[in-house]
Image: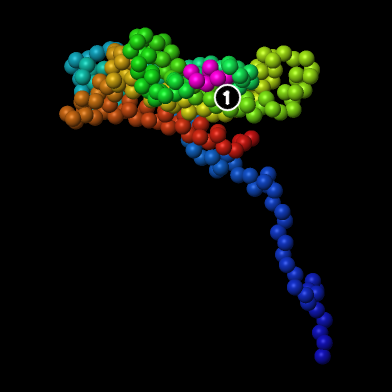
Amino acid sequence: MTSEPLDGFTGGEERFVAPEMTAQAVRLPLWRRKPLLIVGLVILSIYIVVGIFGPFMVDDPRATDPANFYQGPSADNLFGTDKFGRDVFARAVHATRLDISIGVVIAVLAMVVGSTIGVISGYFGGTTDEIIMRLTDVVLAFPGFVLALVLVAAIGNSVPNVVIAVTVAYIPYFIRLTRAQVLAERELEYVDGARLAGNGRWRIAFRHVMPNSLGPSFVQAALVAGWAILTVAGLAFLGVGIRPPTAEWGVMVAEGAPDIITGKWWTALFPGGMIVLAAMAFQFIGDEFGGEEYI
């Protein structure tokens, strides 16, 4: 007795073959792939908005009110008041503009100067490279914070001097990073082509090689911005950086630290928390941008 096979069934084994999934087909949204990057960008965006518009919406950060000293956080004073009756929230908002600006300026200056020196060292090589790298090694022998501390103590503790000192401390990181990239770039065919086309060494170095070597430097700049904020705040906390009564996070933490043991925790906690969040935002952005492509 025989029976006809059912429609679509041949009697043999059939295997289901899934369609090939390309990388583009399964690519998740950026917020799913890199949530920490989004967190960092959101925090940084908030700081930028607060730094730009906040100072116009709060009181004078230096205004004192002895009748309202050491008032806890409330609707009238979101972050409370300090020992002089100054509004901690107003001071923290004004400090946001100063600290974020300082961190970004230091990162940009260190990247521009360090990358330029790194291109010269890596592309021209020889004695020039040897001299630059030995000097860089000498600077790197000192921790960045210690070097900045020494320089600020030597040249003064004004805001411009603090920026210069911290920038000098972080320039060597960009020199070594850019030099390593240039050593790889200068061996590629487009450099030989530019040379055969009659371009001079300086033009090849800065017109062709340097733009192709700056990718890692932008990532490093994001990290350095966060480190710079911590360094500037640390210098102020030790009393050798920006001085009171300037509204700066490190200054506020230094002034509020003795209050913690008396229960006046808000004078140091809020500015300290803002330092941590700012450094964390730049760290997230730098770490995540150091990975895969995003667009």
- Counting from the top left corner in percent of width and height, residue 217 is at 56, 25
Picture coordinates of residue 246 (x, y %)? 32, 13
Q: Nearer the viewer, residue 82 or 208?
A: 208
Q: Residues within 10 Å of mark 1 (few under 14, many from 20)?
A: many
Q: Position of residue 166 (x, y in %)?
A: 42, 18
Residue 58 visible from this viewpoint = no
Question: Which quarter of the figure has residue 257?
Answer: top left
Residue at 29% x, 29% y is 269
Q: Is residue 51 left or right of residue 217?
A: left
Q: What residue is rendered at 67% in x and 46% in y?
A: 23
**Which amino acid type is marked by label 1?**
Thr
In the rendered structure, the answer to whether residue 27 lies left or right of residue 7 reads left
Residue 194 lies left or right of residue 285; in this view the side is right
Image coordinates of residue 3 in percent, x first then y, are 81, 84
The stretch of residues the image draws in magenta is: 129-135
Q: 265 or 191: nearer the eye?
A: 191
Quadrant in the picture for the C terminus: top right
From what the image shows, is residue 8 above or below residue 30?
below
Picture quadrant where residue 211 is located: top right
Residue 130 visible in rendering: yes
Residue 79 sits above or below residue 204 on the image: below
Choose top left, top right, bottom left or bottom right for residue 245. Answer: top left
Magenta-colored segment: predominant secondary structure: helix
Q: Residue at x 38, y 19 (%)?
A: 147
What quarter of the picture does the N terminus occupy?
bottom right
**Is residue 134 in the magenta section?**
yes
Residue found farthest to the bottom: 1
Instruction: Please check the rendered image and state whether residue 50 is part of the magenta-colored stretch, yes or no.
Output: no
Q: Secondary structure at mark 1?
A: helix
Residue designated by label 1: 178
